[in-house]
Amino acid sequence: MSSHEHADKGETDNGELQIKPAIVRQAVLNMLATRSRSATICPSEVARLLASQSDNPETSDWRDLMPDVHDAVEALVAEDTVRLSWKGKPMTARSGPYRLGWNTDSSAR
């Protein structure tokens, strides 16, 4: 993430750091695009990528970015762009650990 993208980060009313949803969404889609169509990724991979690209110490801990990643994933699931699974079994909603992959049953993407 370049220094001009720091404008895409801000604080919520309770002081938590947040990356704009469009940045997180694009990171999810970009990471999925690097894998085979049937592969899945862990949401923490996206958070780790975003944190590693940040030169802002306040957003360099990937764990702090997980709520933003979860929000982006939920939006992509609602659009039928991605699907959720755990240990190879489909999930209808995010609950506990999960992986995500392209929704190959939809015309999305």
Image (tube, grey):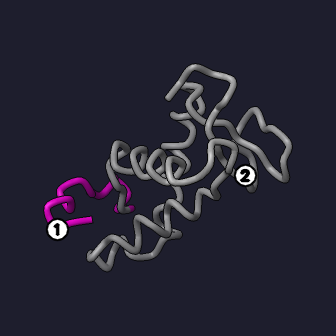
Q: Is 34 left or right of 38, judged from the image as shown?
A: left
- Which amino acid type is marked by label 1? Ser
Q: Is residue 4 visible?
A: yes
Tell whether position 7 is magenta: yes
Identify the residue shown where x is 76% and y is 32%.
92
> Where 72 falls versus 4 (above or below)?
above
Under circle 1, the secondary element is helix
Q: Is 1 left or right of 80, judged from the image as shown?
A: left
Q: Position of residue 39 (x, y in %)?
A: 68, 50
Q: Is 76 left or right of 15, judged from the image as shown?
A: right
Under circle 2, the secondary element is loop
Tell whether position 105 is magenta: no
Q: Is 95 left or right of 6, judged from the image as shown?
A: right
Which disc, if any, is residue 19?
A: none
Q: Quadrant of residue 83?
A: top right
Sequence-earlier tag: 2 or 1:
1
The residue carrying mark 2 is: 98
The residue carrying mark 1 is: 3
Q: Residue 27 or 67: which is nearer the viewer?
A: 27
- What are the residue bounds of the magenta stretch? 1-16
Identify the residue shown where x is 85% and y is 53%.
87
Label 1 neighbour load within 10 Å: few <14, some 14-19, many 20+? few
Mark 1 and mark 2 in contact (Cβ < 8 Å)? Answer: no
Q: Position of residue 70 (x, y in %)?
A: 55, 49
Identify the residue shown where x is 49% and y is 63%.
47
Identify the residue shown where x is 74% and y is 56%.
97
Q: Quadrant of residue 80?
A: top right
Label 2 neighbour load within 10 Å: few <14, some 14-19, many 20+? many
Q: Is residue 68 visible?
A: no
Q: Position of residue 84 (x, y in %)?
A: 70, 41
